[in-house]
Image (cartoon, rainbow, N blue to C red):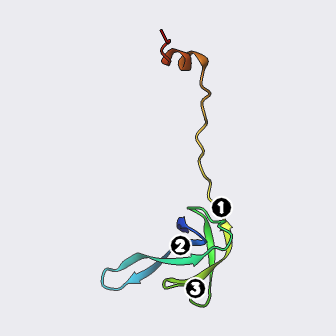
């Protein structure tokens, strides 16, 4: 899952894994974060992606986004139209 896309042509992907801990006698969840190359800046936060390994592209970037499995639903709040009464009453008449 993409957790950051603030860089140009790069995203940070979080990968969760579960493993059984023998001492605690329960499953433990661990998260690893990987930087991946996104050539066309198509990924958004919350997208589920598949990564492929590649040659080292930078100090921390060794993965490429192979495909976007599921796009995230992005909430866009409805815009409210401004009425003329509100905008005209806030302006003071010049005298």
Does the CB distance between marks 3 and 2 fall below 8 Å? no
Q: Say which label, 1 or 3, has the lower sequence index.
A: 3
Q: How many numbered discs sit on the rendered protein?
A: 3
Label 2: few (<14), some (14–19) or many (≥20) C-alpha neighbours in 10 Å: many
Mark 3 closeness class: few <14, some 14–19, many ≥20 residues within 10 Å: few
Q: Report the residue at 62% width, 80% height from top.
A: 64
Residue 25 sits above or below residue 1 on the image: below
Q: Is residue 56 above or below residue 37?
A: below
**Element type where label 3 sits in the image:** loop
**Mark 1 or 3: the one toward you:** 3
Q: Which residue is outermost to the bottom?
A: 55
Q: Which of marks 1 and 2 precedes in the sequence?
A: 2
> 25 or 47: nearer the eye?
47
Q: Position of residue 3 (x, y in %)?
A: 51, 66
Q: Where on the picture, by quarter, is residue 77?
A: top right
Q: Secondary structure at mark 2?
A: strand
Q: In which quarter of the view is residue 69 placed?
A: bottom right
Q: Position of residue 34 (x, y in %)?
A: 51, 78
Q: Earlier in the sequence, mark 3 or mark 2?
A: 2
Q: Residue furthest top?
A: 95
Q: Which residue is mark 3?
A: 57
| The image quarter in which residue 56 lies | bottom right
Measure the C-alpha gap from mark 2 to mark 1: 14 Å
Which residue sits at x=65%, y=61%? 71
Location of mark 1 (residue): 71
SS of the residue under disc 1: loop
- Which numbered dot is residue 13? 2
Q: CA distance from mark 3 to mark 2?
A: 16 Å
What crowding class fits label 1: few (fewer than 14 Cα within 10 Å), some (14-19), or many (20 or more)? some
Given contact means CB atoms under 8 Å apart, are the residues at marks 1 and 3 in contact? no
Q: Position of residue 31 (x, y in %)?
A: 44, 75
């Amino acid at each position: 899952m993409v957790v950051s896309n603030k860089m140009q042509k790069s995203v940070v992907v979080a990968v969760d894994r579960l493993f059984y801990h023998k001492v605690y006698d329960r499953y433990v969840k661990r998260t690893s974060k990987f930087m991946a190359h996104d050539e066309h800046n198509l990924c958004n936060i919350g997208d589920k992606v598949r990564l492929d390994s590649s040659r080292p592209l930078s100090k921390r970037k060794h993965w490429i986004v192979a495909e976007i499995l599921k796009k995230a639903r992005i909430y866009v709040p409805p815009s409210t139209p401004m009425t003329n009464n509100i905008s005209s009453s806030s302006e003071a008449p010049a005298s």
